[in-house]
Amino acid sequence: MSTFHYPDLQVCVLAAGKGKRMRSNLPKVLHKVLGRAMIDHVLHTVESLKPKAIAMVTGHASEMVREHVGQPVNLDWVIQDKQLGTGHAVKQCENVIRDVRDVLIVCGDTPLLSVDTLAKLVDEHRSAGTDVTVLTAKPVNPLGYGRIVRDDDGNVTNIVEEKDATDKQRQISEVSSGIYCVRHEVLFDLLHAIGNTNAQSEYYLPDIVPLALNAGQSVRAVAMFDSDEMVGVNDRVDLSDVEAIMQKHIIQDWQRNGVTIEKPETVRIEAGVKIGIDTVIQAGCYLIGSTQIGDECRVGPNAVLVDAWLDDRVNIFAFSHIHGAAVGSDSKVGPYARLRPDARLDEKVHIGNFVEVKKSVIGEGSKVNHLSYIGDATIGSNCNIGAGTITCNYDGANKFHTDIGNDVFVGSDTHLVAPVRVGNGATIGAGSTITRDVADGGLTLSERNEQRHIGSWKRPQKENI
Ligand code: UD1
Ligand code: MG
């Protein structure tokens, strides 16, 4: 990946709008695309340019946005009390911008933007020596975007919003991405001159284009290489469109980095996920949040991994659900297993079907293969926990711990009533209810009823009425 450094560039991110079309209580830029808020995608991209500073314009629910973003060192918060338009929003940054050559203006609602595209915009703006440069594209569907109006010689003369455009202008396929690079020296004089006589009574940023031309300044358009990058999110239809595009890119990146993904169109891999080489992700998997998967693992089909951590050569069988849990190398989990937060499996552990593990550590080589609940427990190495074993960790008010040593064999259908400790090498007979600590070695089993046989007993027959 290329690295960038623009010490004489100021970035302004516009994120004050409510995003009315989202119909949401959440500000638009906090809506997530593949697990990350839109504003985080945009911030990550502009931070990669290493600009001098970033001004973030917020207004609607600014406290929520601020709380979410925190306080990066080179970020200034700018409040736009009333959302009077994109031009008005940039104007609010006037006092925080000092001593830079150019100002790069981006919108908080275009999360697909790449750093290479922004760098290309700034570089071409500078090499052409232009005052105002707008980033444009020709998307498949230009509906809703500002159209780029050019004269007969192909020079940009204006940008017209959809709502203000004539029928003829709406036919124009070249649109504005809403992203501009403007010479700092001219920007604020232009912004002060913007009026709001238009269909939305807003101070439109695109109006700097005709104003600059009137003032004898130069305006240029730089075209985007991939028009997908500029898709702006205005409603939830756009949100899913953008997510689909980003998903395709993320999946292709992992494929190119040595991960096999079966039926990629059925798989969800969020932006924060990491996957090692020669790992196979099978159909229908959901890899969510900060999930990290090692090399040579196999996941799926239909497994859900949320903030999960898998070491190398782990096999997760179909329909397993792993949330906030860690799985050691060469372990096998599932099918239909559930690992809940703070489940930690050491190396070569087997967790089988319909087993739930919560807040427990399971030692190397131990097996819990069928129909069990292991909660608030520590299990040593090389143990075999029989089918249907339950750690009874909850008395209705408090949780208690079960501690099992190494080389323990727990017979099927055992209840371990916590707090309880089972010593090393102990064997517990099937069907036991263990309420007191078990010594090392030997066989422990709770009292059983005598087994009886009634030879004369007959199965009931259906009565013929
Ligand atoms: C805008 C552009 C349009 C461009 C499109 C690209 C204007 C007038 N229109 O339209 O030319 O094709 O983006 O996606 O610039 N915002 C503020 N304060 C405001 C208004 C908006 O901070 O007063 C922010 C919003 O939070 C948003 C961004 O500016 O992040 C763009 O606003 P939005 O309402 O989405 O504009 P579009 O209709 O998409
Ligand atoms: Mg928009």
Image (spheres, helix red, strand yellow):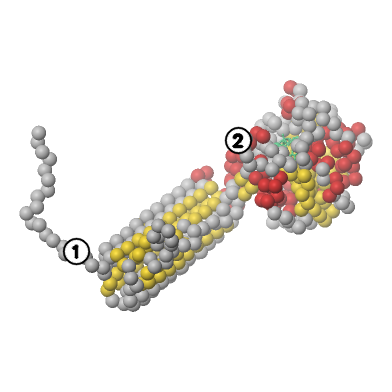
Residue 203 on image: x %, y %: 81, 34
Report the front residue among 326 and 301: 326
Q: In this view, does 391 lie to the left or right of 327?
A: left
Q: Is residue 77 left or right of residue 327?
A: right
Give the amino acid at mark 2.
Val
On-image quarter of the C terminus: top left
User: Residue at the location (16% across, 63% down)?
Assistant: 451
Total numbered labels? 2
Residue 368 on image: x %, y %: 37, 63
Q: In which quarter of the image is ligand 2?
A: top right
Image quarter of residue 414:
bottom left
User: Residue at the location (28% across, 65% down)?
Assistant: 432
Tag 1 secondary structure: loop
Q: Is residue 383 above or below residue 256?
A: below
Image quarter of residue 174:
top right
Q: Mark 2 points at which residue?
A: 237
Q: Name the residue under label 1.
A: 449
Asked whether mark 1 lies closer than 8 Å to ligand 1, one says no
Residue 122 on image: x %, y %: 80, 47
Marks 2, 1: nearer the viewer = 1
Crowd rating for badge 2 (residues with CA inside 10 Å; few <14, some 14–19, many 20+): few
The span from disc 2 to disc 1 (Cα, nearest Å) is 64 Å
Give the amino acid at mark 1.
Asn
Asked whether mark 2 lies closer than 8 Å to ligand 2, one says no
